[in-house]
Image (tube, rainbow, N blue to C red):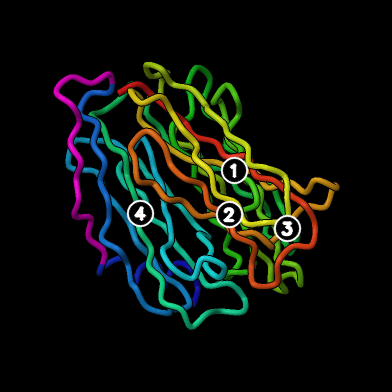
Amino acid sequence: MPFRRTLTALLAAVTAVVVVAPPASAAIPGDELVLSSPAGPSSYVSRVNSASCPAGKQLIGAFAYARGARRDVLITALIPSATSVVALAQEDQDGTDAEWSLIVEAMCALPVPGHTVVQSSSDATSANKQVRATCPAGKKLLASGWNTQGAGQVHVNQVAQAPDLTSVAVTGMEDPDGYGGTWRLTTYAVCSDPLPGQELRTATSPVNQWDKWFDVRCDSDQRRLSAGWSFIGAAGVTPAGQVLPNIWATGTSWYELDVWEDDDGFAHEWYAIGRVVCVDR
């Protein structure tokens, strides 16, 4: 089913129900975490979910993660707007009988100076792509997003925020047997004037042939706003379309990056870099 029709048909059933309030005084006024209800669980080829900020607040952070079928489900789109975020997850080419669900997070705040959403798109071809979205001069990156339009056969191999948080580059790579259709990659950047304590933190996994899971942390007095990652083959062989990232976002200042090899595995050593955008609470 085309992405837009899938999105329109399923969004009507989505409602965000959990709100985590900020402390009494905060560096980011009115910041709060809005967590969607799970879409699922069931075994279904694709699933849409969303989270929206309360009236009068703007989106400053976004996450999406699948639960279940960890080797078979891709987050193929994470699309932020000024006040909400929509995610699309799809089973990979082989599909799965396992049940799975999709959860979306929106970090919201009272209006911040210079808030804007920037997007940049590639041409529609059947080839691996990297697209960078750049914040306007003087602004810094808050949240990132993408849309691969690859029907579950295009993996997001990299979400690389620039160290100075002026841009984000997303890399989409077709799975090992390729994708016969043409597809377009769009990268999104949510930007604003610099916020207190705004910085990029990174963590790196061991180099080996195994699945990986490790924490990517802000300081305990900071908020995590968005995640990034890169998957790199130690022998120069990129695990293109053969590892699947997922997030366990249990704390508001950190998340666990889980990276699972797909059902066919990857026959070389590789490692993962995790990234997180942080701001003071």
| Residues rendered magenta in the picture | 14-27
- Vertical relation: 92 (above or below) 58: below
Q: Which numbered disc, 4 or 1, marks the residue that appears first in the sequence?
A: 4
Residue 18: within the magenta? Answer: yes
Which SS class for mark 1?
Answer: strand
Q: Which numbered disc, 4 or 2, marks the residue that appears first in the sequence?
A: 4
- Residue pointed to by mark 2: 259
- Residue pointed to by mark 4: 104
* Amino acid residing under circle 4: Val
Residue that sits furthest to the bottom in the current view: 97
Q: Check contact, mark 4 vs mark 2: CB within 8 A.
A: no
- Vertical relation: 62 (above or below) 259: above
- Vertical relation: 265 (above or below) 184: below
Q: Which callout, 3 or 2, points to the residue nearer the camera?
A: 2
Q: Check contact, mark 1 vs mark 2: CB within 8 A.
A: yes
* Amino acid residing under circle 2: Val
- Vertical relation: 279 (above or below) 184: above
Which SS class for mark 4?
Answer: strand
Residue 44: within the magenta? Answer: no
- Residue pointed to by mark 3: 240
User: What's the distance in space between the residues labelled 4 and 2, CA to CA?
Assistant: 18 Å
Along the line of sight, the residue nearer the viewer: 269 or 108? 269
Is residue 131 at all visible to an observer of this figure? Answer: no
- Residue pointed to by mark 1: 229
Question: What residue is drawn where x is 83% and y is 52%?
Answer: 237
| In the image: residue 2, left or right of residue 109 | right
User: What's the distance in space between the residues labelled 3 and 4, CA to CA?
Assistant: 25 Å
Residue 218 appears at what percent x and percent y?
A: 43, 28
| In the image: residue 55, left or right of residue 65 | left
